[in-house]
Image (spheres, rainbow, N blue to C red):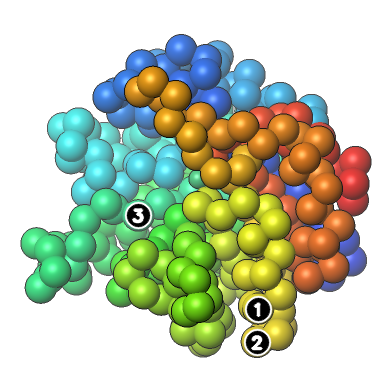
Amino acid sequence: MKELLERLKEEVLVCDGATGTMLIENGMPEGVCPEEWAIKNRLVLSKLHKAYVGAGADMITSNTFGANAIKLRRFNLQKQAVDINKRAVEIAKDAAGGKAYVLGDVGPTGEYLKPAGDLESDEMLEVFIEQIKALESAGVDAIIIETMSDAEELKRAIMAAKESTGLPLIASMTFQKTGEKGFRTTSGVTIPQFVDESLLAGCDVIGTNCSLTISDMVDVVSGMRNLGTAFLLAQPNAGMPKLVGERTVYEQSADEFKESVPALIKAGANIIGGCCGTTPEHTRAIKTTI
Ligand SMILES: [Zn+2]
């Protein structure tokens, strides 16, 4: 396969959609460690990856969002971090079958650095280095750091990637619409702050995922486009979450989702995928629109 960054100079690429909400759809119980569950139920994960590739995804994401030792501690699985990352990539690569790139997924630790939380800066950095090295040694094509909302945590994750690999690096933060103040992450990071810092730190692709609908993301992407010249990624949710009983559901259909894809491309997105609630049908809708 031609190198990912080379292809982005010429075409808009499609990234897969949600993993978490799809695993729940396919029988994953509440409260388990999603990464461990999917290794034990590898056929479910493999089938999902293959469905995304079949729907036209040019790249799929390894099921390693929470596979950092800090987050795995909640399940007493911190010692298995390397193994979990490697096995998840193995499943993704096998499902991709050389037809799609595999992005090594790095999500937040779920904890805060001192003084806001208990975490030492070095510990956070080391945990990200451990995960990213494991992803690279398992053979991912790029690293994607995503759903970040804290600037300090993002900085450590980018630093860890830069220290441990030369792979293409994607960094994505999750923004909320905050009325007159525009878009900010929950910890207050603005779009210009994010663009400046992530480009300065050497990211190849920057973008936004989760929290927003596709039509809101058009504004975020054009905001980023006006500030810099990096490749841009957008992974919107399938509409806004609704609570039905005890379940969170996302109801925007692939057809509704599709309507905003041209605007997202026009705004400057180079990679379009989906976050919570999106399905292979949404992936197909993106692909056919492109
Ligand atoms: Zn999401």
Q: Quadrant of residue 231?
A: bottom right
Report the residue marked by disc 1. Answer: 223
- Residue at 81% x, 36% y is 255
Q: Amino acid at mark 3?
A: Pro
Neighbours of disc 1 within 10 Å: few (<14), some (14-19), many (20+) = some
Report the residue marked by disc 3. Answer: 108
For label 2, the SS is loop
In the displayed structure, would residue 42 be above or below residue 1? above
Residue 266 visible in the current orientation: yes
Kindly identify which numbered label has been placed on residue 266. Answer: none
Q: Amino acid at mark 1?
A: Gly
Quick one: label 2 or label 3, which is nearer the N terminus? Answer: 3
For label 1, the SS is helix
Q: Which one is in front in this view, the residue at disc 1 or the one at disc 3?
A: 1
Location of residue 242 in the rendering, given as x and y in whole percent from the top left corner: 48, 34
Marks 2 & 1, CB-CB < 8 Å contact: yes
Q: 133 and 182: which one is in front?
A: 182
- Residue at 9% x, 62% y is 118
- Residue at 10% x, 73% y is 115
Q: Amino acid at mark 2?
A: Leu
Quick one: label 1 or label 3, which is nearer the N terminus? Answer: 3
Kindly identify which numbered label has been placed on residue 227. Answer: 2
Label 1 beta carbon less than 8 Å to ligand 1:
no
Residue 95 visible in the current orientation: no
